[in-house]
Amino acid sequence: MNNKMRCAEQMQQELQHFRCPLCGEAFTLVNEQRSLRCPNTHTFDIAKQGYVNLLTKAVHTHYDKQLFEARQRIIVGHKFFNPLVKSIVNAIDEQMGSDKVQQSTILDLGCGEGSHLAAICDALSQQTSKQITGCGIDLAKPGIQLAAKHYPNQIWFVGDLARPPYQKHSFQFLLNILSPSNYDAFDSLLEYGGSVIKVIPGEHYLQELRHAFYSTSRATYSNVETLRLFKEHYPESEMHHLHYTVELDKAGLSDLLYMTPLTWNIPESTRQTFLNQETAIITCDLLLLIGRRSNKN
């Protein structure tokens, strides 16, 4: 079964979770299960790679194919975020333990090339007998194309979180990993009793890059405002601190510099000076925030 057929089959099974981002009406599969269409005839084709592009016009960002390939190598090859993935899996598994529902739905908002979501879903599938349904959405088409190519077991959309293509309260878990928050989307998509798991940088995240490339205020990072907003929306939230280091070789350092916005405006000569190192110890300092939506009264 190719990725397009697999995507159509998954869409059919989970169709109740999706809606048209333009009018909010429910989707049906048409054109021999090659397209999603709503009653107002808004139609979106399933791409041959196995994803659906819901944008009505092209969006240009800094996030290109090469960036996402570098990010995938950092996550999968260099295992830079393995402790983070394990922590998220444990948090979800703990909350699923008391839930008698046999299916868990997870949406990654700003999923990039999908490696985090795929690893989390795979690990949960091995730890639980429940059916794990994972969906990812991102504004960057190159990221979703890579996600669909490498991780066909999840459902992938190119889309805008300002107009999410999902029915209200469809997901038990929302992931928001090193990506901007959209609290309106959180409120709309999270089911009652469900959880938002948000990951933000800690003060020392990638401090080696900040110290190498900046001598101003950007040499330090503050997450105070991000924390305040999360706690404002989820007053009973939990916070877990992850702090560890990873040794990267020259290839890993090159991938890291390519994937992080911290280096986008750095002169090439400065980047090359940093890459003259054979290896370097890099700090991963993250805060795992868990906010739970109260059960409906």
Image: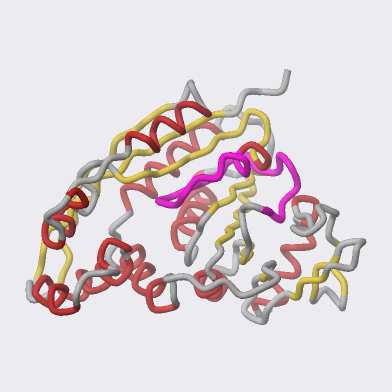
Q: Is residue 169 left or right of residue 243?
A: right
Residue 42, how many percent across, how many down? 84, 67
* Picture coordinates of residue 47, whole percent (x, y): 68, 78
Identify the residue shown where x is 82% and y is 56%: 23
Apparent side of residue 196 relative to residue 83 in the rendered image (left or right)? right
275 vs 134: above or below: below
In this picture, is 163 found above or below 194? below
- Quadrant position of the N terminus in the picture: bottom right
In the displayed orientation, state which residue is furthest to the top. Answer: 297
Residue extending farthest to the front is 216
Which coloring applies here?
secondary structure
Please name whichever residue, 48 or 269, is drawn nearer the observer in this view of the structure. 269
Q: Position of residue 9 (x, y in %)?
A: 75, 67
Furthest residue to the right? Answer: 39
Q: Residue at x 31, y 66 (%)?
A: 74
In this view, the residue in front, 247 or 274, is 274
Q: Read off the magenta span.
A: 163-186
Residue for point 58% across, 58% down: 136
The quadrant in which the C terminus is found is top right
* Relative vertical location of residue 87 with respect to residue 97 in this rendering, above or below: below
The residue at the point 11 percent across, 55 percent down is: 215
Magenta-drawn stretch contains 105? no
Q: Position of residue 285 (x, y in %)?
A: 25, 45
Q: Is residue 184 magenta?
A: yes
Label total for image? 0
